[in-house]
Image (spheres, rainbow, N blue to C red):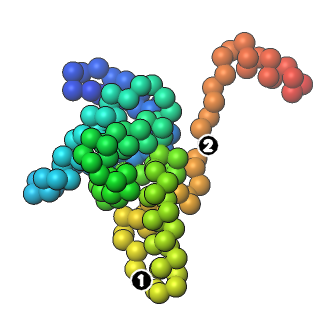
Amino acid sequence: MTMITTTDGYTRPNEFLEKGIQLPLPPARNAVYDMEVYALFMRQLRHEPKARPAIRVFNAMRSTAEAMFLDERDVALMLCGLGLRAPKTAFPESFIGYLQRCMSRQYLYSEPMREDLSELLAYWRAPRRAVAIRLPAYAQARAEEALV
C-alpha cells in the first residue's frame, strides 16, 4: 500500500496512486491562470465526498469548470498539460471527443498531437498491473481447502 505523509505529520494511504491516478503538478510561477485552476481543482478534490478516486477527479474537474465559468474540456486539457493521468472515466465526454478528433486529424493529416495528450493515450493503452488481494486468514484457509 502506498502511503503519503500529510503536512500535519500524519501518514495515510494514497488511494489515487493505488488506482493508477497521477495527480497534476503545480504549474510554473508565471502561469497565474493555470495556478488558479490547479489550486481550485485540488481544493475541490480534497472536499469531494468519499467515492471512487476516478469519480472524485471527474467531480472536482466539473466543479472547477463551473466555478470558473469554463468548459469542462478546457479544464481537462489544462490539468492534462500539468500531468494529470487518470482512467477515461475521470474525464468529461467533451474531452474524450476532443481526443478522438485529435487522433483522426493525426491519422488523416499527419498533424502532430500535443505531447501531453499522446502521453495520456499511451497511459490509457498501457496494461494495468494486477493488484494482489489479501484475504483474511479464515478465508484463505477455506480457499486452500477448496483447492484440495
Q: Is residue 35 above or below residue 113?
A: above
Q: Amino acid at mark 2?
A: Ala
Please determine whether, in this image, residue 82 is positioned above or below residue 47: below
* 2 or 81: nearer the viewer: 81
Q: CA distance from mark 1 to mark 2?
A: 35 Å
Dot 2 crowding, Cα within 10 Å, few <14, some 14–19, many 20+? few
In terms of secondary structure, where does tag 2 sit? loop
Extreme residue in the top direction: 138
Q: Which mark is residue 48?
A: none
Q: Left or right: 30 with respect to 36?
A: left
Q: Which percent across, then down, holds residue 109? A: 47, 87
Q: Quadrant of the C terminus?
A: top right
The amino acid on which the numbered mark 1 sits, given as a three-letter code, is: Glu
- At x 63% / y 26%, what residue is drawn? 134
Observer-nearest residue: 135 or 105? 105
State which mark lies toward you, 1 or 2. 1
Q: Residue at x 37, y 24 (%)?
A: 12
Q: Earlier in the sequence, mark 1 or mark 2?
A: 1
Question: Can you identify the residue that label 2 sits on?
Answer: 130
Q: Secondary structure at mark 1?
A: loop
Is 25 left, or right, of 101 in this rendering?
left
Identify the residue at image location x=46%, y=50%: 91
Image position, residue 130 (x, y; %): 61, 43
Residue 44 occupies which quadrant of the picture?
top left
The quadrant holding residue 42 is top left
Residue situated furthest left in the rendering? 30
Where 67 falls versus 97 (above or below)? Answer: above
Q: How many marks?
A: 2
Q: Nearer the viewer, residue 21 or 44?
A: 44
Q: Residue at x 32, y 30 (%)?
A: 46
- Residue receiving disc 1: 111
